Amino acid sequence: MVKEMVNSRLTGVAVPVGALRGKGSLGVGEFADLVEFAPLCKKMGLGLIQLLPVNDTGYESSPYSSLTAFALHPLYLRIEDLEEFKKAGASVKAKIAEAGQKFEKEARFSHYNVLRAKIDILRDIYAAEKAGVAKKAAAGGSLAAWIEENPWVKEYAVFRRLKEANGEKSWKEWPEHQKVTAKDIEALWNDAKLKEEHLFWAWIQEALDRQFSLAAKAITDAGLILEGDLPILMNEDSCDVWAHPEYFYLDLSAGAPPDMYSPEGQNWGFPTYNWQAQSKDDYAFWRKRLKAAEKYYQAYRIDHVLGFFRIWAASRQDISSALGRYIPYVPVNNKDLAELGFDSGRIRWISRPHIPTAELWDVLNANSIAHEADRIFSQVLDRLGNEDLWLFKDAIKGEKDIVALGLSPAAQNYLCSAWQNRMLFEYEGGQFFPVWYFRNSRAYQTLSGNEKQALESLLEKRRIDSERIWEDQGKRLLTVLTASSNMLPCAEDLGAVPDCVPRVLTQLRILGLRVVRWFRDWGAPGQPFIPFDEYPELSVCTPAVHDSSTVREWWDKEADQEHFSGFLGVPSLPRIYNPGAAKIILHKIAGSASRFRVFQIQDLLHLSPKWYAAESASERVNVPGTYNEFNWTYRLPASIEKIAADTDFVKAVEELSAIKAVAKNGRCI
């Protein structure tokens, strides 16, 4: 039945596991809470539950910053369901009761504190029952069999022990074992003195696998699909990068190019993949990831699918990604530029920042920091011959070098801005990529009309050449994924999308993502919203995602209400979001032609007046570009049981789930 549902039109809910409030959860949602959540979803007519990534991220709250592509997060373990807990003494049970009283009152959960408390309790249980665990890990034991079926746990357990022993520091800061081979890891795993600690982490993972498998079965038994989330990138400080550095380019940092929301781009800090190296073992890393995910999910979300076609990457020596580039890319080279009439001096002019003496002095004097001139001219810049122009010294490799000088904010900001002020970025000798805002550069403004036209024609040719490569690479890599699993792939294809991406996704039957507020004809006058009957069937339609505001916050604070109301054909929508507005807006969205219509749990809760937070911003999951204890710690406003008792809410979602797609002639089908 579930296999048939994957290809059916469904309404679903997106909810982080940690957001659930179950009868037995300890300060945070746990896998076991999904067992309680599934019947409510079924009762409401939903057909799909979509989760955020559930891999171990350690004490980092972002689920997209995992320590491993395989191990599950101990945060989601139901300690009281452990076999060993039944034998636990009064002190352990008292710790759980104390933690419950402390954490259950919180509106949002404390990732660090809850995880710390859970690990401490698990260590107490393990210390009392380690002989029994060791017996299970011996030949013929259940844990030994599980380890044999999940060999990745050896790397993970060794990494986890070393990370904890080094105060949770990145492996790049460890005094030893920074560079290891498979043989080294196996030797550490088999070290008798370390075995007890390694088994602790393996024991936790076996329990997590068992509990998540039971939850996944409860969901499928209820006739629902469970959709997981597979982040494309790995944290630099991860078991996988540590154990398999050959799969990655560690000198590059992945991110996103500049846009209206992030004018200097996004620098995520994650290394990029060495696809050529991964091809040598037929992409075993990805095939294993999918095999592991398939134990629980019937569908999966491919985060940042554009990265399989081409990834935006910046130097590790930069802080922003303004000087990033697409990889792969057919570069502009010295020969190309020479053929356009650019000699070495002109190539230097368009590819290296040039700072006029007067401009720099204007900044220094305007900000009363003339006393920093000597340091800047001696440590940062070299004069270009006898001209009133300065170049950055060869020793300055990126923005981090500028920041490290400890100059005043005004000087630092000016120099970092100047560092980005070039038309072409020379990332290797004689290999150039156009800077994202190259038309704003000092060099571009000085070119003649013919020179601008010639360069723009060359760059357009390189873009077309590169797109052919992107299409080939994306199709090849995504074919590996689709051929390695029976799960339905759903792609997060937001951002600057090359023309080849929707083409390949359609060919491979991969569902794209359509976020209503951003699915517009941006090139047309008025930038109209795309009608819901024109949404592709091979897509997931949603009004909000974990990185955006909820529909409520968007409507109250961000939306052009008149424009959107006109698009919906409902000009009398309330100015302040309420259940009536929620019903109208969500019902219209539910009529889209997309195969899946997925709503965040917060957006569904707004169908009832009982579940509105005092401040709409408090209902967000994450605010991109900010790092704090708020992000990724959203919790339901009440327990699953209390929400299920809200009959008006249950009925409202049931009505939403029953809505059919609206055909082009306006009739429901």
Image: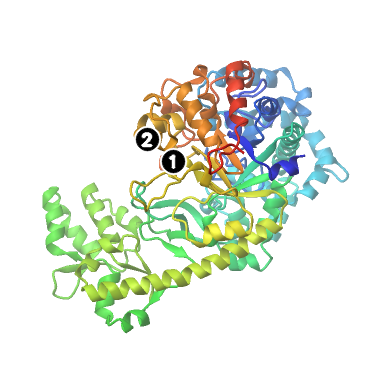
Question: 391 left or right of 117?
Answer: left
Q: Is residue 664 above or below residue 637?
A: below
Q: Nearer the viewer, residue 100 or 588?
A: 588
Residue of label 2: 559
Q: Position of residue 205 (x, y in %)?
A: 71, 40
Amino acid tagged 2: Ala
Q: Residue at x 72, y 24 (%)?
A: 80
Residue of label 1: 517
* Residue 554 in sight here: yes
Mark 2 and mark 1: Cα distance apart in space: 8 Å
Find numbered disc 1 in the image and state the secondary structure of the residue it sits on: helix
User: Image quadrant of residue 277?
Assistant: bottom right
Find numbered disc 2 in the image and state the secondary structure of the residue it sits on: loop
Q: Position of residue 233 (x, y in %)?
A: 55, 53
Q: Nearer the viewer, residue 410 or 649?
A: 649
* Residue 646 in sight here: no
Q: Position of residue 595 (x, y in %)?
A: 61, 43
